[in-house]
Amino acid sequence: MKEVLVTIQSVYQYLEKLGPKKSFQILKNLGYEKLLSLTGKVPKERLIVLTQKLSEDTVVELVKQIPEKILVEMIRENDDDDLVYFIHSLPMEDLALVSRSIPPHDVGLLAKTLGKETSVEILKTLGIQKSIALLKEIPMKDFLWLVDEIHVGPVIQLVSELSVADCKKWIKQRGLAELPILVKFFGVTNALVIFKKLGMNQALEMMHLLGTREMLELSLLLSGMHLEEKNMPALTVLKPNDLSSVNKTKPAPKKKQIPKKKKTSKR
């Protein structure tokens, strides 16, 4: 009973701090029970600060669009300034999708490590759907490690150009450890040219066949050769399947049968 009274008191103190107009609109649109539940799970001071920095319409949409359990976790895992920046920078539908798809702890870690502006830039540049799909494949700590190794710009450029399917193939077969090596050696633009020329499947096959070190050494060797495009053969090189069909031995011609002589009967 004492806890209930304390919670009710917190609700009234919360509404009082917001002023009559804002508190009336929020109470009218959310209902007393919703506010009672929310103020019982989130520190009153946090709610007051957040609500003062947001319009009443935004507060109402936030509570309606995002499940209470997730919203409480978002407030707990993110600083006030970071949370307000995310709310102001992303459409409510996108924010709700991100909150339901990426753990609030990971979003908070992203903002604390890279900064709120960079975090929002990544989500907007890659697109919400693609960001969510990739972060389901890559743990947040591994993604932050990759960014730390090759910086935000190259990561965004690389991931923007590759499809989600290609990214998944690479992660599944090679992991992330080799990406910084390839990017630092080839540069993002050259790495993308290789992926587009070969296709992800053939690029992965080559990596598997040669090995990372050998592939880098071969690339370095080729880069030092004086090759000219005009010397490229104009003739279409036969594919292995076509070549094998050519090399098949032709069937031996059938021997002509010599007609047998008829036996002459003796008289």
Image (tube, grey):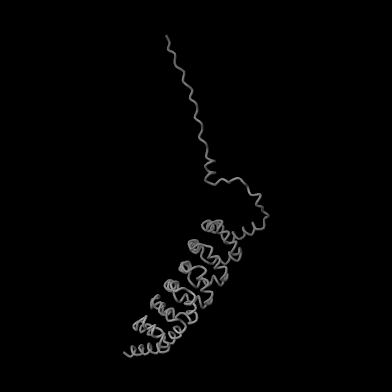
| Residue closest to the far left | 1
Which image quarter holds the C terminus? top left
Pinpoint residue 138: horizontal percent, then vertical percent.
48, 68
Give the residue at x 35% y 82%: 31
Residue 36: quarter of image: bottom left
Pinpoint residue 17: horizontal percent, then vertical percent.
42, 89
- The correct choice, above or below, for 118 with respect to 46 in the image is above
Which image quarter holds the N terminus? bottom left
Pinpoint residue 91: horizontal percent, then vertical percent.
46, 73
Q: With 132 as the anchor, is 239 left or right in this view?
A: right
- Report the front residue among 121 and 181: 121
- Report the front residue among 99 and 30: 30
- The correct choice, above or below, for 23 with respect to 99 in the image is below
Give the residue at x 62% y 46%: 234
Q: With 197 as the anchor, is 46 left or right in this view?
A: left
Pinpoint residue 194: horizontal percent, then vertical percent.
57, 59
Total marks placed: 0
| Residue closest to the far right | 226
Give the residue at x 47% y 21%: 259
| Residue closest to the far front | 21
- The correct choice, above or below, for 213 with respect to 21 in the image is above
